[in-house]
Amino acid sequence: MITNKTKFSFVLASLVFALGLGVATPSLAVPSYARQTGMACQACHTVFPELTPFGRLFKLNAYQIDNLPQVQGITSSKEYELLLNQVPPLSMMFQTSYTHTSKALPDSVIPGTNSQDGQVLFPQQASLFYAGRIAPGLGAFIQITYDSASGNVHWDNTEVRYAKQVSFAAEPLTWGLTINNNPTVQDVWNSTPAWQTPFDQKTSAAPVPGAITQLDGALAGHGVAGLTGYLWWKGIYGELGFYKSSPQGFNVNGLAGPLDSTTGSALTNNAPYWRLAYEHQWDRNSISVGTYGMEAQLSPPGQALAPPSDRFRDTAFDGQYQYIGDDNIVSVQTTYIKEKQKLDGSFPLGLSENPENDLKTFRLAASYYYRRTYGGALGVFSTTGSTDAIRYAPGPTFGFANNSPNSKGWIAEVSYIPWQNVKLLAQYVGYQKFNGETNNYDGTGRNASDNNTLYLLGWLAF
Amino acid sequence: MKANHLAVGFAFIAAGVIPCAMAQDADGRKLATQICSSCHGPRGESVSSAFPRLAAQQAQYLDAQLKAFRDHSRADPMAQAYMWGMASQLDDAAISSLAAYYSAQKPVHGKGGDAKLVQQGKAIYEKGIAGANAQPCGTCHGKDGEGNAIYPRLAGQHAEYLVKQLVVFKDALRADPNAAIMHNISSGMSFEQMEAVATYLASR
């Protein structure tokens, strides 16, 4: 039977996760690629990290275009055994931020007092990247990040990709394989979660809604590895693969290597991931529509890695429109993720109120940039789902007084990009509903709007 | 998928010794299909007006331009952002092969634009601009804008691209062969005249 301690651990883990979501937010594409290709950021990005059609193809073809002097090894049949950049395409990212919530958060220990109002993070995140070609057809995006929320260095968005072009029906066909640590990090459209734009950057110093679908970042940075294969032909993209748990830091207590019940949540299946999309371009416009999804089976926290597990089936749809003019750039991105939760593991243990739940996320946002220098974005978001008194339990600041996961709000952002690799932005998040309610959502009198957040970010990539 | 399948999959990726289709490859068709087409479209039929159509472009002109990108004598903003990097690793053989490939493609014929602009542009193209140092364009670029050796094909080109190049010539940002001629000609042209002649050519 479930103990109070287990229950507490589960809730605590949820809270830490909710507060720490900023840690797993996507970062950016990097000057490594500019160094390697000799091309300016604008070739691949409208404004980083959003990709242009050319940027999408550069990624699909495994980051191959190269401008750097090479160390080469070649066979007698003129095949490359080695084609290595003499200077590795490295780069750095440094972010510093200021976060202010509408109402200060209560002190975590002393009742009746507040935590600091207005949080400076210096850095919020700092990353080192290797991004570029490793060998003919083989390329990588590897990011190691220090983040101030955890005070640790961790593996951030990472993928290694092999791609090859062949001809099919007299048109180029690209096929490839990617191994990566976050579902959708391999995707080339900015409508899917890992690289969603706008609002790709979020604070890690303010509460965010606690209910999140697996595909919408729940698995990001939490130790998974996926191998997928893809095809790209005449604007049609298809991808299929599997994810497994790939624990990080699991041996810190001197325990045995393989995953066991001491791990929070482990994938107990070869979680299938699928993606289908179509893109059409005309003049300066491009539009894409797609679907993606995953079926993840996760062991309940603290339980043996044996059936029955909880099954999360995420089915999602996305779309993107871009107009990339010389002076004006307009982008619209949207996604809808529907998650069906079959809690065969948690329910019998008393870790959920219902045997089945559902959770839905919707986002729609548009952005505009003038000469890639001045920009603004506006968007709406919502999360809705079935109530569950155990999964969505009451608690100060991060809890759910009415057991509903529903959240709803809007985001506005203005940004200034003085140079292509420097971004300054001011973002405001307004909540109409937070963790189930507009007023007194946590049962201690905190309102959704108390979590409205002003976020200032300075972002350097070099 | 079992974990060992993952391992096998990754070993497959890592162990491949794959012929490289990148720079230093003198196969123009392969380079054009696998790399250049990302912006310039299949067979040089670009969709976006940010990138010029290369189908049926004069081989000698393409050769000269790729060399001008490589030695940075063509220094307009788009050249610096895109083509300096792209051309940096192309040797003379690859450049020749690319030029031959694109010049052998079928030309793209544009769509008609604003009738009044087309009419004005046709007059400028065929007669030049009196008193503005602008000779009839067809003298060098051919009666139908088909180009001639070092003089590029202009017919069917994106109007926006043509206007941008005229501005770039006027601002002396191109120092590639014959840019001086176009600097003199474009210096006497108003923006409206540039738009007119570009609209006419795009409609050819």
Image (tube, coloured by chain):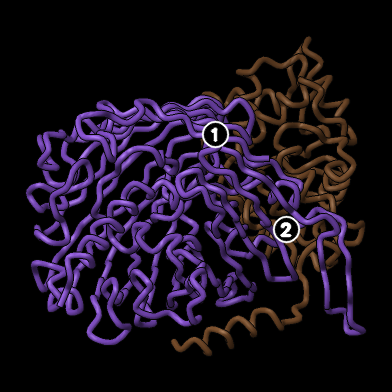
Chain where mark 1 sits:
A
Label 2 crowd (10 A; few <14 / some 14-19 / many >=20): many
Specify whether residue B133 is in view: yes
Taking the spot 58% from the left edge, 71% from the top edge, the residue there is A174
Residue A246 position within the rendered picture, expressed as x and y whole percent measured from the top left:
48, 74
Q: Which chain is brown?
A: B
Mark 1 or 2: the one toward you:
1
In the structure shown, which secondary structural element does the residue marked by tag 1 occupy? Answer: strand
Q: Residue B36: percent from the left, percent from the top?
A: 69, 56
What residue is shown at x 54% (from left), y 72% (from top)? A179
Percent across and percent down for residue A278 are 41, 62
Mark 2 residue type: Ile
Task: Pick the quarter of the image with the C terminus of chain A.
Answer: top right
Quadrant of res A109: top left
Farthest residue toward the front? A110
Which of A48/B19 is in front? A48
Q: Is residue A264 left or right of residue A137?
A: left
Distance of label 1 from label 2 (alpha carbons): 35 Å
Q: What residue type is disc 1 on?
A: Phe
Q: Quadrant of the N terminus of chain A?
A: bottom left
Q: Label 1: which residue? A: A122
Image quadrant where residue A417 sits: top right
| Viewer can see residue A438 | no
Name the residue nearer the viewer: B85 or B177. Answer: B85
Q: Residue furthest top?
A: B131
- The residue indicated by pointer 2 is A65
Colour assigned to chain A in the rendering is purple
Which residue sits at x=69%, y=71%? A137
